[in-house]
Amino acid sequence: MSVTEEKPDPKDPAPDQQPASGAVPGGGTAPGETVPAATSARETGASETHSGRGDGTAGEAGANGPAGGDAGAKDGKKSSSWRESILLVLLGVVAALLVRLFVLDSFYIPSESMEDTLLINDRVVVNRLTGDIDRGEIVVFTGWDGTTLIKRVIGVGGDHVKCCDAEGRITVNGVPLHEEAYLNPQDFPSQQSFDVTVPKGRLWLMGDHRAASEDSRAFMSDRYHGTISEQSVIGRAFALYWPLSRIGTLPVPDTFGKVR
């Protein structure tokens, strides 16, 4: 998205500039024409001369005369106000662009791999300043084939992730995950067995719609056992903003808080 910057007009009049030798702003006096000093000050609204130059009468309205300098000062204030307003708008645009580039981003959901948490064409807000990535967070990342994907973090570096225990649950460091809060109701935790210790600095990722998600399980034969580098993470999805009927946050499910 390009932004066209508006700048203050360099032709804006400076309110306190005084034309020399009784010249009328806007061109009122023809060359050689004589203008009475008292009339000149009243009819032209000339501002007061601060430097002491000129004919000595153009800026002297007198105690009871028209205050031409006041009108000029008001015009100057208006001009200054416009310049300040434009500057504030420009600063706001620049700040928004910086936030967009370095802090927040938005992504749409193109597939069903995260249903029912995220549906096709949902829009999410992503925080690029991820810091430490935790279990249970939803992250946008550059995937195994270079495409941009979105999945849930099941295990972080050092975790032992296994499927499944006697009750069919995924375990992390021996602690079973109770996934009812986010797992697609049509799915089992996984129909594919795995037993992986996540290397340091890497993540084990899975979609919430396990039967429709190509995730870490599909790449267990590679050198990193299907895990993704933390450096591949673009950001953490923390809110759903479209459609409005589904607006809300994307918190970490409570079950991950029990894992040590």
Image: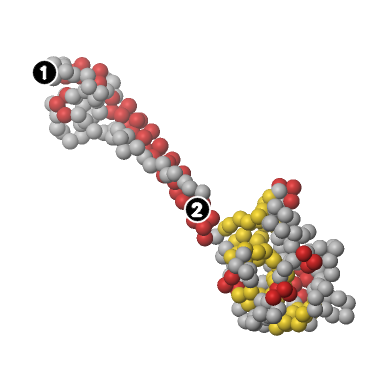
Query: Label for residue 32?
Result: 1
Residue at left 71%, top 70%? 215
The residue drawn where x is 75% and y is 72% is: 256
Q: Amino acid at mark 1?
A: Gly
Q: Residue at x 15, y 33 (%)?
A: 52
Image position of 173 (left or right of 10): right
Residue at image coords 68%, 50%: 242
Scheme of colours in the image = secondary structure
Q: Position of residue 68 (x, y in %)?
A: 28, 25
Residue located beneath label 2 in the image: 97
Q: Nearer the viewer, residue 103 or 205?
A: 205
- Quadrant in which the C terminus is drawn: bottom right
Relative image position of residue 225 (x, y in whole percent): 68, 80
Mark 1, other Cα within 10 Å: few <14 / some 14–19 / many ≥20: few
159 or 186, nearer to the observer: 186
As drawn, 127 above or below 170: above
- Which secondary structure, mark 1? loop
Residue 114 point in image, percent of width and height: 74, 62
Task: Give the mark, 2 or 1, whose residue is nearer the N terminus.
Answer: 1
